[in-house]
Amino acid sequence: MKLEDNNTRNELLKRLRRIEGQVRGVQTMLTDERNCHEILQQLNAIQSAMRGATLQLVETSAAACFQEIANAENIHQRDLILQDLLALVKKAS
């Protein structure tokens, strides 16, 4: 399944660029020998931002899967789509 919604794609790219900047900031903090508490705080912020990006992608993908299930012609096709969705959710957690 591809991410076809341009708005979601752009929002995810924006989030990931922000996260990339945060990671570079932590690298600088390490080079500058900053306090471990400050570094850990930034690492937690990065993890939280990644969870947010992951959740956004899962929500968008789930909505697309539900639409596909509604349009599916037979039960076997619906089961395959549902299995794909469940695999996506498992990977995200």
Image (cartoon, helix red, strand yellow):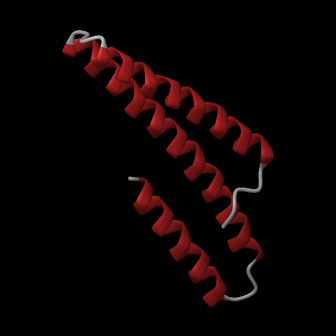
Furthest residue toward front: 31
Q: Is residue 8 left or right of residue 82?
A: right
Q: Position of residue 11 (x, y in %)?
A: 68, 36
Q: Position of residue 43 (x, y in %)?
A: 33, 26
In the rendered image of this protein, does residue 3 appear above or below residue 31? below
Residue at the spot 79% in from the left edge and 46% down from the top edge:
6
Residue at the spot 65% in from the left edge and 85% down from the top edge:
77
Q: Position of residue 87 (x, y in %)?
A: 46, 68
Residue at the spot 45% in from the left edge and 39% down from the top edge:
51
Residue at the spot 26% in from the left edge and 21% down from the top edge:
40
Furthest residue toward left: 36
Identify which residue, 35 or 64, lies in the foreground.
Answer: 35
Identify which residue, 5 or 15, lies in the foreground.
Answer: 15
Count of numbered circles in the view: 0
In the rendered image of this protein, does residue 14 appear above or below residue 57? above
Q: Position of residue 16 (x, y in %)?
A: 57, 35
Can you say which quadrant of the picture contains the N terminus? Answer: bottom right
Q: Is residue 38 left or right of residue 83?
A: left
Q: Is residue 37 left or right of residue 29?
A: left
